[in-house]
Image: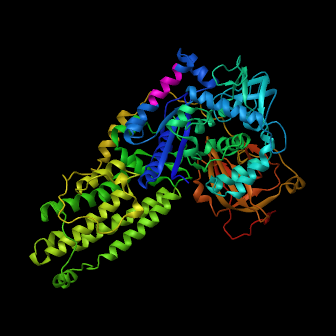
């Protein structure tokens, strides 16, 4: 079996310019790719753009360009961004910037279409068939909308609006090819059950399983060319173009040679497939349901795994949008912060799979505390003292027997295996966390090494040892251990902070690069005494917070136009709208119809593209916990709700919001002009499921 690895980001829709979410996924993929290559694994890293569909046509028309010119315009910004942040091929980043307008992609997509068309579904039906589609389509989402996924208009003569973009939907009524998705439910569920790590994290896996168990509908996978001309033509039927998501998902295999000999020679489908797909949780359904179904239908091996990460929120826990003025501008970010500081912050700050918070001030604080005062200070003080006390050459780590007692008298541990064992254990934990994509925990482990080495120096006081000729060997041993710790740190941290790691490596006087050192094969004591160190330079200079924030505020664009309209109000999220007074009286029999129960929040998380909604799992003392949506995301942090007792309307008819079924209602008061919700709770312990009367 070949020792290869393939990692992908989504290919980003070429109707808008790159933002923090795009940058983050690319950084994660780049980090994974560098870690694999560091261990000698032949790795292929893909990112790129999805360039077809009605949305591109409309954007091009609005800008006075052809669709291809519009795609080229957006791609130029992506290429500029990846270069500036060190993510392109020239900086050791992606192997291909994939574009769905490439001729080889057209070839590969057509080949898969034909393979699917030749095959039968698990129930013996044709996988592709021609029919008639009538329904509502959101160009911005590139998705057909069911009745529970759009806002019905007040005026019946007007079209409904997308719940996400608050834009009018297009009515589609035309001949279409359909993919018989409904026949693949059992096959998909079998995959999810037999491969628990196929979708990660587990909370996302459970969402997908719930969606598939709820029943799958056949998927329209083409549009008439008279409606959408900018797309891949359907093989043998040029009157149709392929649905943008069908075309886009297949890029992951066409990029490495599926259906095209030229790409096969340059990359190799059999060599690299299957892939690890890194995606945002808002597009998980496409990757975890549609894509595996297409591959099963085409008789192609499924991906290695599909891993969904969370969303970046502002420091107050709100979704970022230009409407709120809380976005992170990439040009501002790149101007004021080093690439490695940005990489470290996003990987340390977000627990991968959960939502994270991003603010310029938080980045400055983390950079100053962990990088400037932590790793940077350890590197600077160690190498500066080697320069001052050891003639700029790495000292020996050996303390002669006749000097051991002197070393012990000043509190030095004469057994260097104590520190070596600590670092080896940290290395093993780091590698394990990295394999599990637990970047935050991996970095936390590494910083325990930084703290340990820093404390060793502070306790030993080399500046005092240097004054005593009898402690010369003790001084050398302390500085050697600090330098050897730096060597290990530069190897471990290379995938996260490539530039800083290479700088430390070079300042230690070492040749080659930490990019080529397998961390699992590191051995303590391989630094050679007598090696001349390099020119000592600060790795992470301290950031002047007040000055930098003033500059950032001056740079922020004050005339930015919102990229999307504000989201429509979500009614009935908690059903706790403020009421100025009693509007009408009810009888006791009416009240008795409402089944109020005590519930306990087991989990809480935000819903993609919904500022106000939280998805709650609540224990009502029933066999299974209930899934309930609550419009309280702007006022309650999800993690602080876990374990809390709440009041639930248990017999409310289930309804769907944003594609999720809500099986009840959280009771909350509402006060103030904004109608702030305040959850009803209990001051005494009450069992789950107890009824309120």
Q: Is residue 75 magenta?
A: yes
Residue 11: quarter of image: top right
Residue 219 locus on image (x, y percent) = 76, 35
Which residues lie in the magenta part?
69-77
Q: Is residue 217 magenta?
A: no
> From the viewer's perspective, is residue 276 above or below residue 50?
below
In the rendered structure, the answer to whether residue 524 lies left or right of residue 211 reads left
Residue displayed at 62% across by 59% down: 641
> From the viewer's perspective, is residue 204 above or below residue 8?
below
Residue 560 locus on image (x, y percent) = 47, 28
Q: Nearer the viewer, residue 134 or 320?
A: 134
Residue 494 locus on image (x, y percent) = 37, 53
> From the viewer's perspective, is residue 221 above or below residue 407?
above
In the rendered structure, the answer to whether residue 303 lies left or right of residue 516 reads right
Q: Quadrant of the N terminus?
A: bottom right
Residue displayed at 51% across by 50% down: 4
Residue 549 visible: yes
Residue 166 visible: no
């Amino acid at each position: 079996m070949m020792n290869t690895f393939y990692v992908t980001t989504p290919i980003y829709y070429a109707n808008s310019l790159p933002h923090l979410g795009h940058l983050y996924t690319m950084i994660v993929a780049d980090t994974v790719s560098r870690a694999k290559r560091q261990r000698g694994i032949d790795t292929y890293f893909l990112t790129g753009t999805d360039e077809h569909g009605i949305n591109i046509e409309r954007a091009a028309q609005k800008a006075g360009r052809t669709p291809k010119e519009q795609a080229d315009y957006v791609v130029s910004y992506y290429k500029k961004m990846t270069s500036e942040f060190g993510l392109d091929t020239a900086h050791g980043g992606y192997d291909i910037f994939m574009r769905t307008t490439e001729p080889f992609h057209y070839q590969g997509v057509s080949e898969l279409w034909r393979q699917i068309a030749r095959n039968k579904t698990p129930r013996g039906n044709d996988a592709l068939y021609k029919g008639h589609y009538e329904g509502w389509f959101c160009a911005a989402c590139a998705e057909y909308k069911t009745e529970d996924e759009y806002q019905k208009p007040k005026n019946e003569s007007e079209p409904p609006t997308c719940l996400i973009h608050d834009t009018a939907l297009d009515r589609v009524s035309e001949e279409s090819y359909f993919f018989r998705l409904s026949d693949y439910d059992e096959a998909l569920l079998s995959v999810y059950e037999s491969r628990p790590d196929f979708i990660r994290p587990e909370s996302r896996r459970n969402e997908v399983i719930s969606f598939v168990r709820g029943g799958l509908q056949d998927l329209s996978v083409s549009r008439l060319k008279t409606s959408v001309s900018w797309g891949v033509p359907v093989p043998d039927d040029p009157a149709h173009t392929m649905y943008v998501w069908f075309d886009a998902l297949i890029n992951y295999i066409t990029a490495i040679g599926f259906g095209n000999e030229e790409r096969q020679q340059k990359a190799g489908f059999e060599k690299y497939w299957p892939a690890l797909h890194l995606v945002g949780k808002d597009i998980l359904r496409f990757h975890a349901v549609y894509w595996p179904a297409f591959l099963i239908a085409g008789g192609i091996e499924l991906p290695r795994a599909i891993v969904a990460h969370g969303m970046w929120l502002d420091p107050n826990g709100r979704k970022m949008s230009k409407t709120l003025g809380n976005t992170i501008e990439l040009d501002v970010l790149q101007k004021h912060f080093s690439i490695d500081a940005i990489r470290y912050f996003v990987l340390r700050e977000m627990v991968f799979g959960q939502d994270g918070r991003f603010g310029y001030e938080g980045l400055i604080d983390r950079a100053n505390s962990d990088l400037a005062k932590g790793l940077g200070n350890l590197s600077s003080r160690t190498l500066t003292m080697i320069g001052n006390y050891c003639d700029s050459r790495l000292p020996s780590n050996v303390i002669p027997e006749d000097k051991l007692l002197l070393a012990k008298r000043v509190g030095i541990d004469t057994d260097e295996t104590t520190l070596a064992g600590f670092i080896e254990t940290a290395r093993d934990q780091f590698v394990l966390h990295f394999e599990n994509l637990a970047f935050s925990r991996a970095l936390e482990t590494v910083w325990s090494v930084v703290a340990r080495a820093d404390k060793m120096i502070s306790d030993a006081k080399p500046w005092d040892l240097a004054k005593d000729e009898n402690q010369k060997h003790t001084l050398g041993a302390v500085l050697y251990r600090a330098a050897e710790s730096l060597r290990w740190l530069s190897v471990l941290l290379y995938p996260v902070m490539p530039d800083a790691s290479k700088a430390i490596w070079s300042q230690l006087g070492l040749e080659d690069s930490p990019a080529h050192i397998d961390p699992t094969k590191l051995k303590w004591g391989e630094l050679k005494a007598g090696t001349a160190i390099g020119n000592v330079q600060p790795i992470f200079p301290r950031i002047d917070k007040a000055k930098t924030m003033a500059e950032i505020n001056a740079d922020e664009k004050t005339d930015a136009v919102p990229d999307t309209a504000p989201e429509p109000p979500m009614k009935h999220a908690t059903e706790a709208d403020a009421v100025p007074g009693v509007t009408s009286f009810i009888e006791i029999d009416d009240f008795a119809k409402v089944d109020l129960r005590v519930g306990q929040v087991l989990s809480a998380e935000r819903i993609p593209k919904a500022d106000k909604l939280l998805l709650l799992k609540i224990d009502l003392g029933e066999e299974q916990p209930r899934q309930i949506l609550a419009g309280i995301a702007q006022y309650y942090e999800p993690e602080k709700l876990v374990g809390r007792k709440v009041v639930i309307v248990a017999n409310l008819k289930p309804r769907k919001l944003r594609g999720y079924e809500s099986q009840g209602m959280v009771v909350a008061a509402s006060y103030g002009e904004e109608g702030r919700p305040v959850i009803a709770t209990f001051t005494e312990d009450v069992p789950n499921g107890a009824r309120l009367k």
